């Protein structure tokens, strides 16, 4: 499954946040088959539609879509020079589909900052620079080989284009811009190089509770990273929330004027950044959101439930969530002609409520 790697300088609150991510007992109970690795946290993507479906179908359980977060320790200023970024760090980050940087905003004299005082813009720059330098090293090693390839296969268009893309990437990185933020460079040609800065970025600002309500501060921080997404939370509060049951957690959030937890926001933004969407299934046992890429076809969607469903796919019975809730239940939706039979070329829409027919 797709995952988001969490990076950040030491003492910014990564472990605190990550502990909150992994203490998600409710989810752990509902996903007993998920392989739990020590550096992976699974977070449910809040989805109000599931509660409504559970009402309509009398479902006993609600299973949201999830996002995997991977704790990637080991980045400090100068990491890419000197001894270089650790192998484990590089392997972990290369496997991530997006990168989430935690940035310290909270001030606490008892918690030292590795680079002196608290300064979000400098920390963002530091991590950005390390990732850019790592990519430049990768390209520096690769370009002579790509040049040879291009010379040897002078008639092969692909070899020329890869070399061209690599040189363009070098230029952009030399200018201090990450490849994701740059426009016009075809990084799909450079996939084999596993570059780090091609990945989408999400920023998590770790604030003190009283700073959370400071709109001016939030706007300033958002400006630092725009157009990337920013999430504002207090990692210590997130860790507390993870220990509470649902009602208590809701009460604590309300007392702070927050509608939902920072982790819930992070899951939602992460899900979107990864280019994912959900379709829904419901019955007496469970109301559930399944994760698919945007643009997935009906058989591909069926394959997420079980590979046999994809192989033996016959058709899908589909009703949009809005049509279903407007009609009131499945029977009424059918009577209103809102339930469609779709074949193997159907491209799924977000919020489709689906039942698959298949051969086994
Ligand atoms: P890491 O090195 O990035 O993993 O940072 P940790 O999660 O270990 O946090 C470093 C220290 O900062 C710990 O003592 C945390 O309790 C503290 N800390 C983390 N988040 C916050 C926060 O939002 N506010 C305050 N005041 N302290 C925090």
Image: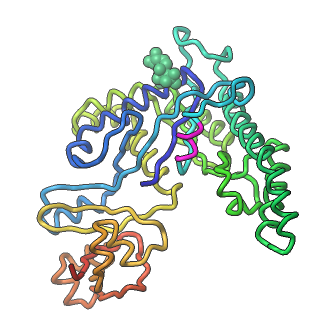
Left or right of 351 in this view: 81: right
Q: Quadrant of residue 79?
A: top right
Left or right of 195 in this view: 280: left
Quadrant the C terminus occupies: bottom left
> Does the magenta run of residues contain 10?
no
Span of residues in magenta: 90-95
> Does the magenta run of residues contain 91?
yes
Q: Position of residue 156 (x, y in %)?
A: 80, 73
Q: Is residue 227 visible?
A: no
Residue beneath the point at 24% across and 89% down: 336
**Depth check, front residue: 148 or 2:** 148
Whether residue 338 is situated above or below residue 246 in the rendered picture: below
**Depth check, front residue: 213 or 100:** 100
Q: What predominant SS class does the magenta segment belong to? A: helix
Whether residue 315 is situated above or below residue 165 in the rendered picture: below
Residue beneath the point at 16% across and 63% down: 55
Q: Total of numbered circles in the picture?
A: 0
Residue beneath the point at 66% across and 37% down: 220
């Amino acid at each position: 499954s797709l995952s988001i790697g969490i990076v950040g300088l030491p003492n910014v609150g990564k472990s605190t946040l990550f502990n909150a991510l992994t203490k998600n007992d409710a989810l752990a109970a509902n996903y007993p088959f998920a392989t739990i690795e020590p550096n992976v946290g699974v977070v449910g993507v809040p989805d109000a539609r599931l509660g409504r479906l559970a009402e309509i179908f009398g479902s006993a359980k609600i299973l949201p879509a999830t996002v995997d977060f991977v704790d990637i320790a080991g980045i400090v200023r100068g990491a890419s020079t000197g001894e270089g970024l650790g192998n484990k760090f590089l392997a972990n980050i290369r496997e991530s589909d997006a990168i989430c940087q935690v940035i310290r905003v909270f001030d606490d004299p008892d918690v030292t900052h590795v680079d002196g005082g608290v300064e979000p813009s400098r920390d963002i720059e530091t991590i950005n620079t390390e990732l850019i330098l790592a990519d430049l090293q990768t390209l520096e090693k690769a370009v002579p080989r790509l040049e040879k390839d291009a010379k040897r296969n002078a008639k092969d268009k692909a070899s020329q284009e890869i070399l061209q893309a690599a040189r363009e990437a070098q230029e952009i990185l030399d200018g201090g811009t990450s490849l994701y933020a740059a426009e016009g460079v075809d990084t799909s040609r450079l996939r084999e190089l596993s570059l780090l800065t091609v990945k989408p970025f999400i920023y998590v600002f770790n604030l003190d509770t009283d700073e959370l309500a400071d709109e001016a501060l939030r706007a300033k921080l958002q400006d630092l990273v725009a157009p990337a997404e920013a999430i504002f939370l207090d990692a210590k509060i997130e860790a507390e929330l993870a220990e509470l049951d649902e009602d208590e957690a809701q009460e604590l959030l309300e007392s702070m004027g927050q509608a939902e937890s920072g982790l819930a926001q992070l899951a939602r933004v992460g899900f979107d950044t990864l280019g994912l969407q959900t379709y829904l299934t419901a019955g007496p046992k469970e109301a559930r959101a399944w994760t698919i890429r945007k643009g997935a076809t009906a058989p591909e969607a069926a394959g997420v439930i079980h590979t046999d469903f994809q192989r033996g796919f016959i058709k899908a019975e589909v009703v949009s969530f809005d049509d279903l809730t407007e009609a009131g239940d499945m029977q009424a939706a059918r009577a209103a002609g809102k339930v469609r039979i779709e074949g193997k070329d159907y491209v799924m829409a977000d919020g489709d409520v689906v039942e698959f027919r298949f051969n086994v």
